[in-house]
Amino acid sequence: MKIRTLGSTGTIVSSVTLGTMTFGAESDEPMSHAMLDAFAAAGGTLIDAADVYSAGLSEQIIGRWLAANPATAERMVIATKGRFPMGTDANDLGTSRRHLRRALDNSRRRLGLDHIDLYQVHAWDPITPLDETLRFLDDAIRSGAVSYWGVSNFTGWQLTKAVHRAAALGMPAPVTLQPQYNLLAREIEFEIVPAALDAGVGLLPWGPLGGGWLTGKYSRDEIPTGATRLGEDPGRGMEAVDRRGADERTWRVLDALHLVAGEHEVPPARVALAWLQSRPGMTSVILGARTVDQLVDNLAAGDLELTAEQLASLDAASAPVVPDYPYGELGVDQRSRSI
């Protein structure tokens, strides 16, 4: 598996991250441990969690695996997140010093660790003053509880504000950003990717397969059914059939994806992941899976090299509609996209 630096830091991580949102929910503990085994065997090193995944059970499952595999655990880079509520108390959410202190302590306890490699603010908090959040993160780094901090689901202006305010406070800047990013969701290229490139913040995209749309399982004439995320829940969030299936652009992307996959004789999902790994600013792509077979098949994307022509065809098919203003030639950082 390819390796890259964690943003602009000197820490090395695998180009694929194991996402653990399914742990304790769609995947029971034995299956979750089997996926962790397979990920480690493939050379994976970055594991991403969050306190709210299965209400803390995901972190507990990871913690028990780390404890049972101490030699392997030594080379793992552990990331988790805090921000969303874990209880009903009015202070049990957000990015206040009070809540993040408790969230971090509880995550460390569940993971069985005294130190988190990457602690991430799971989303922007419009109530808590940014300085309060930043000073807590600085204290957590200075105390040795955290090595680096990052953000998730931030907009471009939110990321830029956090970066510059951290500099003004004389503290470390965020090193990573977790956005939704895939061939069907490229809107972050308008503002968020340029902001991350400008700040030297690495991207850790989630949802790389569009909730299943980029696996090649679905066709124009057949609504997903059965043991797939869309089959079991057709109204599922951004991947909903009535949103993606009605979009002609979706089918252009899938046609281009199938064409390139056929040229390499690999599953379409592998091509979608390889395309994403080639994007500017990419640190590591977060893969979520429900079974070992799903995970192993997708991990092979790290070995797939797409030609310039194939990348260009996927870029063209997936190009989002770009407003002339303010995203014309003068408004877009050309390093961030090729549309």
Image (cartoon, helix red, strand yellow):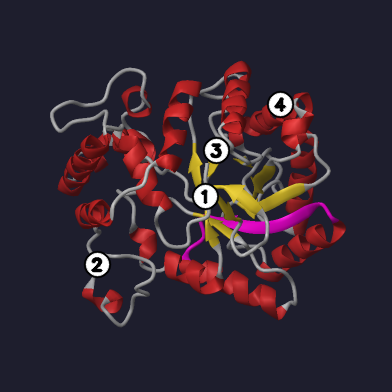
Q: Looking at the image, which residue sits at the far bottom?
A: 330
Vertical arrangement, residue 175 with respect to residue 288, above or below = below
Residue 132, how many percent across, how many down? 73, 66
User: Which three-letter amino acid code belongs to the residue tagged 4?
Assistant: Trp
Label 1, label 2: how many angstroms apart (C-alpha)?
Answer: 26 Å
Q: Quadrant of residue 103?
A: top right
196 horizontally vs 92: left or right: left
Residue at image mark 4: 65
Give the residues in magenta.
Answer: 144-155
- Pick whichever of labels 1 and 2 is earlier in the sequence: 1
| Marks 4 and 1, the one that precedes in the sequence | 4
User: Label 3 near label 4: C-beta < 8 Å?
Assistant: no
Identity of the residue drawn at 23% across and 70% down: 323
Q: Earlier in the sequence, mark 1 or mark 3?
A: 3
The image quadrant where one finds the C terminus is: bottom left
Residue 19's disc is: 3
Q: 5 above or below 216?
A: below
Element at badge 4? helix
Q: Nearer the viewer, mark 1 or mark 3?
A: 1
Across and down, in percent, residue 255 comes to 17, 41
